[in-house]
């Protein structure tokens, strides 16, 4: 069965591994303009701090992602998956009280360490209301994940380094540049907005900026979080971010982004640092914060895999597995992930 995947970010990479495992003949096209998966911090955090709730379907996504990333590491012979402790510095008495209540609930206790005296009195200058540790967090070294997977696909002769030209697609017959495919799966990230087949879906472009900094004196045993994240990378380097600017397609790092991040960082540390790198990317987001998966209503061999939003590294492994099981074995895609929730483009 011949498959074409368009886009080699985290969605396209997970899809390609799934199709390879199912013994399909798969090709993946990428134009090398990755602006999301390669820029991301790659943090997998089971909690949503803003509301102190669990992330959507966390008990399914986390174990599946861990297993899948370990499997991909074995397949490509490169290590990129790192366990992580995230330490939240509570911004208020109220959030401390939330944590105390929630950690007692069975569904939360898997993801929140019970607060200890050491957590409450944690010796960080910025600790005012205590701190709490998140369990089962991790991060993917995003840039090496993307580069190593693309290198692996290149060595197998299945990475086509070019732009997919929609004018050369015969969607009715699933033929692209003269070759017929069983499925063409579009995992184009924010560029799906310009896809003539799937442009009707309400995908938003949410810009984010992130810094890589160096500091000899910053706390580096755990990732700290309040207003922003501070992720230790080793060798006294850290990632810090990020920002959210809605409805913008441009990926130019800005002075404003830099100022926001450096201002937010003050809520975690006042240690001196130098900025080594400054990048911007665009997240493919959907207002209801759910992905966009499924076949086109009129061209069932044309498929979309998108809408991973701000949590692509946590969601992609299981969602892409569910999509491939749907395409190859007819397994239902959960309703809240399916594009049918946005209706049929011909009846709009
Ligand atoms: C600053 C920032 C920080 C983030 N931090 C985190 C984090 O800590 N944890 C987390 O889980 N997520 C994070 N994210 C979100 C995460 O990056 C996204 O959820 C994820 O990368 C989306 O992956 P994707 O494969 O759908 O899209 P992308 O990574 O954008 O991949 C799409 C690919 O398709 C290619 N493409 C598009 N159109 C075409 C075409 N016509 N022809 C050929 N190729 C094409 C592009 O070049 C690209 O390589 C962050 C994002 C940003 C911007």
Image (cartoon, rainbow, N blue to C red):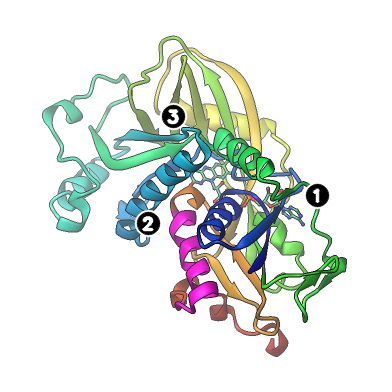
**Residue 227 visible within the image:** no
Residue hosting label 3 = 230
Q: Nearer the viewer, mark 1 or mark 3?
A: 1
> Magenta includes 317?
yes
Q: CA distance from mark 3 to mark 2?
A: 23 Å
Density class for disc 2 (Cα within 10 Å; few <14, some 14-19, many ≥20) is many
Look at the numbered discs 1 and 3 and tell me whether their residues touch, using CB distance below 8 Å. Answer: no
Magenta span covers which residues?
315-332
Task: Residue 250 in the image: state x and y as whole percent.
Answer: 74, 46
Does the beta carbon of the residue at mark 1 sit less than 8 Å from ligand 1? yes
Residue hosting label 1 = 162
Horizontal side of residue 310 vs 170, given as left or right:
left
Q: Is residue 12 above or below residue 225?
A: below
The quarter in which the C terminus is drawn is bottom right
**Residue 234 visible within the image:** yes
Q: Earlier in the sequence, mark 3 or mark 2?
A: 2
The quarter in which the N terminus is drawn is bottom right
Density class for disc 1 (Cα within 10 Å; few <14, some 14-19, many ≥20) is few
Q: CA distance from mark 1 to mark 3?
A: 35 Å
Q: Earlier in the sequence, mark 1 or mark 3?
A: 1
Instruction: Identify the disc placed on residue 61.
Output: 2
Q: Earlier in the sequence, mark 1 or mark 2?
A: 2
């Amino acid at each position: 069965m011949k498959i074409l995947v368009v886009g080699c970010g985290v969605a396209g990479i997970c899809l390609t591994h799934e199709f390879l495992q199912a013994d399909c003949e798969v090709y993946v096209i990428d134009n090398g303009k990755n602006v999301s998966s390669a820029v991301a911090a790659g943090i997998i955090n089971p909690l949503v701090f803003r509301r102190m709730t669990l992330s959507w379907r966390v008990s399914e996504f986390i174990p599946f992602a861990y297993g899948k990333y370990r499997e991909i590491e074995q397949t490509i012979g490169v290590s990129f998956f790192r366990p992580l402790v995230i330490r939240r510095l509570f911004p208020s008495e109220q959030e401390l009280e939330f944590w105390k209540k929630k950690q007692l609930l069975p569904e939360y206790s898997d993801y929140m360490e019970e607060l200890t005296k050491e957590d409450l009195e944690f010796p960080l200058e910025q600790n005012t209301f205590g701190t709490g540790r998140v369990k089962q967090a991790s991060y993917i070294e995003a840039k090496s994940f993307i580069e190593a997977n693309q290198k692996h696909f290149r060595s197998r002769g299945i990475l086509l380094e070019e732009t997919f030209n929609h004018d050369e697609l015969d969607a009715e017959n699933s033929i692209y540049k003269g070759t017929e495919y069983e499925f063409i799966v579009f995992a184009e990230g924010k560029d799906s907005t310009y896809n003539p087949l799937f442009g009707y879906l309400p995908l938003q472009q949410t810009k984010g900026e992130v810094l890589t900094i160096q500091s000899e004196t910053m706390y580096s045993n755990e990732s700290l979080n309040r207003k922003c994240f501070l992720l230790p990378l080793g060798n006294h380097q850290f990632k810090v971010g990020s920002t959210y600017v809605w409805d913008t397609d441009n990926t130019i790092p800005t002075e404003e982004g830099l100022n926001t991040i450096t201002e937010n960082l003050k809520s975690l540390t006042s240690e001196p640092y130098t900025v080594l790198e400054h990048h911007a990317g665009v997240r493919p987001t959907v207002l209801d914060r759910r992905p966009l998966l499924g076949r086109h209503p009129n061209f069932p061999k044309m498929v979309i895999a998108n809408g991973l939003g701000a949590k692509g590294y946590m969601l992609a492994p299981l969602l892409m597995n569910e999509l491939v099981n749907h395409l190859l074995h007819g397994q239902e895609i959960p309703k809240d992930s399916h594009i049918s929730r946005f209706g049929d483009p011909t009846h709009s």
